Each structure stands twice: as structure tokens, then as C-alpha cells.
Image (tube, rainbow, N blue to C red):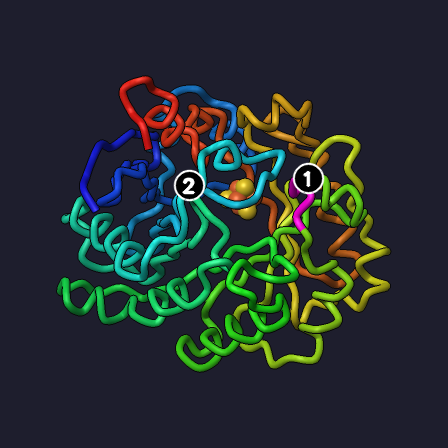
Amino acid sequence: MNFKNAYYLPSGRVFMLETKDGFPIECTEMRDVKVGGKQNLEVRESLDAHVIWNHLDDYENKWLCTVSTQKGCTHNCKFCDVANLPFKGNLSQQEIESQVEAIIKYTPYVNKSNKLKLGFARMGEPAHNLNNVLGAIVNLPKISKRMDKDFNWLPCFNSILPRKTSQGINGFEVIDKVLEVKENNYNGFLHFQISCNSTNEKIRKELFGGADVLSIEEIIKYINNKDVTNRTITLNFIVMKGVEVDVDKLASYGLNGDKFTIKLIPLNNTNNSQNNNLETYANYHNYEDLKALECKFKEKGVPVVVDAIAKCEEAGLCCGQLAHIFVDSDKKEI
Ligand code: SF4
């Protein structure tokens, strides 16, 4: 992988790398913004980078990184700007690991982190490249050792869980294989995050651009019969106006706090979401609506996290947006 460029956010950077066959690949490194109470509102709404800088957590406590798993994506999710990129296949395990090495190499001042959360979540659906992604996850401790770093890894496998992957692997088998690595290699400290977005399966499928995915009911019932230690499984909802998120429906499927956590996040301001007229249910201005939804889940005894990107960070650097600069440019043909 060749280094092409780095783009800066107040909390970190998006690196643009390039595969040998000329495909632009994004990976990121960010620090967490650590605030509570009133300051939380100030940080979310501010357009002043200094406000973010004043609240950044130490790398040693938490470092948030992401890598891509495919050259583009086969799916066409209505809220994601990777969807409109051309698809040129899977990244090899080595190409995935090269991104990890590049992030470490270009951040040479970070030698220790008690929680290095690495999301396989930038460009691509990792389930379609399962063996290479899981191979890279298993190898993370070797990479940091080789580079003489003291990192406590928290890999994060983010998936829409296709019913059958392009390599012919059944969605339930994907769950099994991820849980196997979670429990056997990471003592349960692997973050398995499943994209849900709506409890109405018809709408959910439309949001995923027609992808045939496992239903939320199937996912909950299947995982309820599995051993899940330490980190619970996250059901991720990008909350959008007019899109159903029905807590009672989830409870009727057997959603429980021993196995699951719910994550509620606002919709990012992507080009694709605008073109598809999707609107976020809540963001910086009406964050309290998101908190109200959080309460409904808490009443059912299910842990919830709400996550909101600061306004200042929404600067055209969402997944796939930088790759578009290269792909859409007349100078670049891939
Ligand atoms: S959200 Fe994930 S699966 Fe959907 S288009 Fe984007 S990268 Fe692909």
C-alpha cells in the first residue's frame, strides 16, 4: 500500500492509501472526545476546533482507529458514500494489516494504549472478506509486538450480516466465526457490532439498498443461544426521521442486556443520505430526543449507548467521501 495523503479533523486524521492496482483506500485514527453534562452540548455544537482539542482523551486511555476491508463495497446502502464507489474486490489480509501498520507508523508518538479500538468499518462489508478480516484480527497483537508498541487491542467487527456472503458463507456461520475469535482469541473483548437501523424489516432492507440480510429477530434468537462473555453484542441503529425503531418489538424477540447493547447514533451528513432524502432523527440541536429514545431501552433493562459526532467533525470526511475525490477526478481512473 502506498501513502497518498492525510486529511485532518480536530480529533484525528483520515489517511488515504492506495493499493498496487491503484484503488484509493481510507483508514483513520482519532482520539475520543471525553465530556459529560453541559460541556457535552458545547462540544457537539461548536465549530471551533479548540473546543474539541480541550476535551480529547489521552491516546493511552483510548485510541479509535478504522481500516477498510474491501475496494469499495458490493452493497448500496442509502446512507453511505462508499456505496457509489466502483467495487474492485476484496483486500488481502496483508493489505488490511498494511493499513494498521501505516496508522501506527504515521503516529509514531503513540507507544502505549490501554484500549486501541480498531474498527473493520471504513470501506467494505467485512463479512464478504471474512477469512482475511479475521486473520488480520488474530494477528493484531503480533503487529504491535513487531512494531515495539504496547497496545491492548479491541477489534471491532461491523456488519450488516448478509444472509449469504459473496464467498458463499451463511450469515449464521459468520456470527459463529466472529464469536469464535471473540471468545478464543480475545477473551470476549471483541466488539461485534451489527447494523440494524430499523425494526421494520422491509424498510431496513430498503436502507441497505435491497441487500438480503439476516432479520433482527433471527439475529437475536440465534445469539441468545451462544456464549457471549465480557463485551456484549451491539445492535446499531442510525436513527432517522420516519424510520421505525420499536423497543417493544425488539423485546418480543428476546432482546436482553446479558447478550446485547443498543447503540443509537445520528445519521451522518453524507451525500448519499441527502440524495435519498434521509434525515437524522436527532443531532446536536435536539440531542435530548435521542436521550428520550435511550430511556425507552433502559426501561427494558437493555444497556444503551448514544453516540453523536460533533458538528465540527462532520467535514466531508465520512466513509468513502475522500475516496470519491480520487475516483471522481478526471485524472484518476481505476
Ligand atoms: S454501510 Fe457498509 S455495507 Fe453499506 S455500502 Fe457502506 S460500506 Fe457497504
> From the viewer's perspective, is 249 left or right of 54?
right
Earlier in the chain: of badge 2 and badge 1, it is 2
Residue 39 visible? The answer is: no
**Looking at the picture, does residue 268 appear above or below residue 199?**
above
Residue 321 at x, y percent in the picture: 43, 29
> From the viewer's perspective, is 4 left or right of 51?
left
- Asked if the stretch drawn in magenta spans residue 333, the answer is no
Q: Considering the numbered disc 1 on the image, is that residue within a helix, a strand or a loop?
A: helix
Q: Amino acid at mark 1?
A: Leu
Label annotation for residue 263 = none
Residue 270 visible? The answer is: yes
- Name the residue at 35% across, 36% down: 11
Q: Nearer the viewer, residue 173 or 42?
A: 173
Q: Amino acid at mark 2?
A: Val
Q: Nearer the viewer, residue 46 or 318?
A: 318
- Name the residue at 65% across, 71% down: 259
| Residue 47, picture quadrant | top left
Cα separation between marks 2 and 1? 29 Å
Residue 296 at x, y percent in the picture: 79, 50
| Residue 164, picture quadrant | bottom right
Q: Considering the numbered disc 2 on the image, is that residue within a helix, a strand or a loop?
A: loop
The quadrant of the image that shows the C terminus is top left
On whether ligand 1 comes within 8 Å of the CB at mark 2, the answer is: no
- Give the quarter the ligand 1 occupies: top right
Residue 91 at x, y percent in the picture: 35, 53
Residue highlighted by disc 1: 207
Residue 273 at x, y percent in the picture: 61, 28
Residue highlighted by disc 2: 33
Over which residues does the magenta segment extend? Answer: 207-211
- Name the residue at 56% across, 60% down: 165
Name the dominant secondary structure of the magenta segment. loop
Between label 2 and label 1, give the one nearer the viewer: 1
